[in-house]
Amino acid sequence: MDKAIRRASLWACVAAAAALLLACGATTGEASLAGRTDQGASGVVVIKGRVTSELRFGPEELSGMATVETRSNGVDLDGTYHGVFRHKGVPLRELLDRAGLAKQGAEFDKPLDLVVVVKGRSGKKVALSWGEIYYHNPGDAILAVEAAPVMPHKPCAKCHDETTYGQRLGQLTRKVGLPRLVVARDFYADRCVEDVIEIEVVQPRPGVPTSKPDKLFSPRFSLMNAARKETTTIEDLSGLPRTDVAAVQTGDGIGYHGVRRFSGVPLRDALAGAGVSFDAGQAFLVIAADGYRASVSSGELFLQPDSSRIILADEAEGKAIDDGGKFHLVTPDDFAADRWVKAVSRIDTLAP
């Protein structure tokens, strides 16, 4: 009898939640986005920093630009659950394009080193690299203006007790803070930000000089841990787990140059070996001996299912890298190879 009562109670919870959502225009299962408008965002989103024009977008303006739909499974690295939602929103890339770029200095005019910091009303800040926004699909990072929960349509008494299941249902019926940053490529939702109020384009280390050496080569690189205020010098990758990747080498400037095969160490493992751990607001600046550089976010390295493919390579086509060696940063899943940094001489941890 107790089991029957518990199951009935659970089913009543599901039915009540579903009824509430139906009243708001959603359905069970793959909930419709139709009618699911702003759930409480009343402020303005400011785009600032290294931009040509500081822009402000209100909820109505953002809704008028919303063209992309995506789904997110809201689970953080520590297991905290925030609900499963379908979203409609504006690609972050589109907002940045409207603001334009205004980098400091002309020595390195590529945007590859830029970091985009998104801030919520709660004070939460997360970092995205320029490359993950511009060298992946536009829908991979959006500012959502609509959110519809994906409601379960069966009771779960066999798996969870009523309290646990009720708490999870509560995440689906809560008010979602919009606009909401959704990074669809992330497996974990630590970079999800609700009630976004600010997007800042940051140019780290603008004073790093550039040069044209006769031979581009660096026998070692330094890894700076900002949290510990320590610097580690690495001359070889022995003792770290190795991985092999195949990457299409094509660039916005040089075009297609074939498929390359590299061997090396996941960048996240090299960072972890120096005591660097995940921080949603953190990014890393990888700098070459000639001053070429690119940013990589902590989220790319610790939250995404394919993050181990971003490597520090010391071999190419089965041989030690000499031309542009000793170490290369390779981001094989970017649409362009512009973030590949040859002759890595320094990796700076950019504190949030």
Image: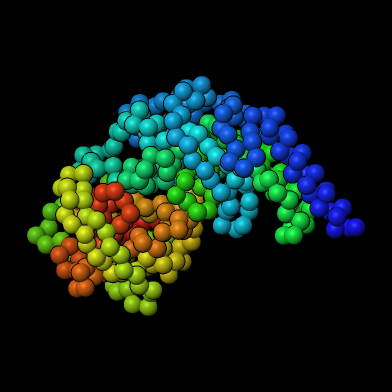
- Quadrant in which the N terminus appears: bottom right
Which image quadrant is residue 32 in?
Answer: top right
Query: Can residue 41 be seen here?
Result: no
Which of these two is toward me, 142 or 55? 142
Could you say where residue 244 lies in the image, as x and y percent from the top left? 31, 68
In the image, is residue 299 above or below residue 181? Answer: below
In the image, is residue 104 above or below residue 314? Answer: above
Question: Farthest residue in the right direction?
Answer: 1
Could you say where residue 63 lies in the image, as x and y percent from the top left? 49, 25
Which of these two is toward me, 231 or 273? 273
Q: Residue at x 72, y 54 (%)?
A: 156
- Number of residue marks: 0
In the image, is residue 167 above or below residue 325? Answer: above
Quick check: 68 left or right of 179? left
Q: Residue at x 62, y 47 (%)?
A: 82
Quick check: 277 left or right of 296? right
Q: Residue at x 34, y 31 (%)?
A: 97
Could you say where residue 327 lies in the image, as x and y percent from the top left? 25, 66
Could you say where residue 317 lies in the image, as x and y percent from the top left? 20, 69
Query: Can residue 302 be seen here?
Result: yes
Question: Farthest residue in the left direction?
Answer: 214
Which of these two is toward me, 115 or 11? 11
| Colour logic | rainbow
Q: Residue at x 75, y 48 (%)?
A: 166
Which image quadrant is residue 259 in?
Answer: bottom left
Quick check: 210 left or right of 90? left
Quick check: 26 left or right of 270? right
